[in-house]
Image (cartoon, rainbow, N blue to C red):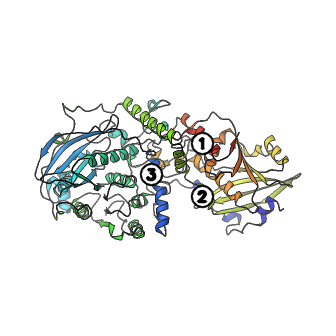
Amino acid sequence: MRTFLTLLAFTLVPLPWASADAAPADHRSGPLKDLNGDFSFTPPATRGEWEARAAVVRRQVQVSQGLFPMPSKTPLKAVIHGRRELDGYAVEKVFFEAMPGFYVTGSLYRPLNLSGPLPAVLCPHGHWPDGRFMRADDAEVARQMASGGERDEPAARSPLQARCVQLARMGCVVFHYDMIGYADSIQFSQGLAHLFKAQRPDMNAPEAWGFFSAAAEGRLQSIMGLQTWSGIRALDFITSLPEVDPARIGVTGASGGATQTFLLAALDTRPAVIFPAVMVSTAMQGGCTCENASLLRIGTGNVELAALFAPRPAGYTAADDWTKAFSTKGFPQLQQIYQLTGAPEKVSLLNRTEFPHNYNLPSRLAMYQWMERHLKTPRPAPTVEAPFTLLSQADLTVWDEAHPAPAASDPAFEKRLLKEWQADADRQIAARPEWIDEALPVLLGRTWDEVARGPFDWKLDDTRTRKGAVQRMTGTLTHGKPAEQVRCVFLYPDEWSGKVTLWLPEDSAAAETSAGVQAALAARTAVAIPQLFTETEAAPGQVRRVAKDRDFLGYTAGYNTPLPARRAHDVLALLAWMRQHDPKPSSFDVHAESALVPETALALTQVPDGTVEVAQLAATPFRFGGLRDVFDRNLLPGAVKYGDLPALLKRIRARQVKVE
């Protein structure tokens, strides 16, 4: 039998970059991606390929939002009060509990003189000043009127109220609900939810933690996730109203409200039509902390996330902002997805780049027509908006003497809410531990099948040595697209048994002469000693981070694979590559010293059953849950939620691996 060394040296196809000065760089060492990167989207070639891809991306969204499994749906305990009848519609005040003790607040608009079943529209508002209470000043009103963006003063002062009023006049039940920290949503401040800057040491304890902390990241608990969950519960609320037809639900918002729109539509099957305005593009993905979460946009972006709604009807708008190139970059790819899914007529774009960022009258008129067409509204869409009564903050606020507001910005409540969120997930995962297997590929950013597809390119160094009956060579394995690289030393006994041990040491140079490696060689086992990916640290023990991220990990880990997962990629790549050789090694063992156990364990959860016979993993006190620095190089978002290191070891054993 030819030795494995001979196979490596002589049977691989010569590489086009074989010269030393032409080797491709590891993309992981390049600049970090941030929310202003290039998020171009290339649709798959077939509907089947898209459906498979869509399922993967949808799971990524669920996991990143902290909504896998979905939190238990506790009673809403909805309160509707303060009814006021106006010209063709009524406005009421609403609050309900999305989670126990956490309130979603908003205004409910209902058409007058119509009986159900009626269509309904959710209206998340986005980052307009004061949100639902928005009231533009005279200068802004004048600008809007002069530009042609608005025709009437009330609509210019509050385009948010304008769309709710007109949709109600068209015969829709409309729920206009607050983003966290806006208007009546006071339990978490706007400064925390949307303007978070610096870590809060008092909100990062093992048994009591708050948003943005290492503890929260370990559990994938974010403001964005809570806001997405609020939208799901808003759907629960509006579909519970007796006059609402649950098959005719629309969602529309602009800017940050559009982010909420397409994320909600990606996760919940109840919306029948959406209209996200001035948000979706291949450029800026959403600048607020409420629009970012760790793991969300790794390998994907807003165009693909919006495409998850296909083939249901979706209308978009573009303006003179980051969406100005959407008509040529992003929207054509959305059209391809709708063509693939058999609904080319169900996607549209209003391209009005003469206007700045907006949800102005031309955009609203397009939205009304879209809703009329696809929701079959009882009354037609207007060609102009009729005047309406602009309501004040005092008219709209849900809190009064009979309905007192909850405590504002209460740290004790924040800690309690996040702890109960995790406790609910713990109960569900304990009942269905297979959910861990579904979540781990998202944390890792790879599946075994993806890694095994390669491509793989092995380049030998020029220098090869021999010590006694052992041959030594070094080289670089380039794997995947975009290219990732791992250097590796291979030690081969002349009388190779067919067995290979992947040896993962803290010090690769010292490992070659260690007793363990020498014993393996004496037993005629080949040994591979890789140098797993590392990166220049921003500070001792920390990962690199994108600029100006305000101590929020989501701005970095929302777009870049976390370091433990990147190192696990190398482990998987080496195993997959060696496994594909002919003749194949007869068996694999893996040995990891203490410092490399977390990434090794993460990788081994993905290998096919029987690939690795024995995993010798050194005892370690390490737990992901013990990390307190949100930028710790070992932090893996979600690892604590899905059982920490003990759960990884349990999943490895379930793959017929003997763990020692």
Percent position (x, y) of residue 173?
Answer: 21, 52
Secondary structure type for disc 2 = helix
Decide if residue 247 is in sight here: yes
Q: Which amino acid does label 1 sit on?
A: Leu
Asked if residue 640 is positioned above or below residue 461 in the image, the reply reads above
Which residue is under mark 1?
648
CA gap between label 3 and label 2 equals: 20 Å
Kind of residue at disc 3: Val
* Residue in the image at 28% along x and 32% along y: 406
Q: Is mark 3 on a helix, strand or loop?
A: helix
Measured Cα–Cα span from mark 1 to mark 3: 22 Å
Residue 402 position (above or below residue 504): above
**In the rendered image, which residue does mark 3 sit on?**
61
Residue appearing at x 63%, y 33% in the figure:
621
Crowdedness near tag 1: few (<14), some (14–19) or many (≥20) residues, C-alpha within 10 Å? many
Q: Nearer the viewer, residue 569 or 563?
A: 569
How dense is the environment of label 3, judged by Cα within 10 Å: few (below 14), some, or many (20 and up)? many
Give, as a three-letter code, the residue at label 2.
Asp
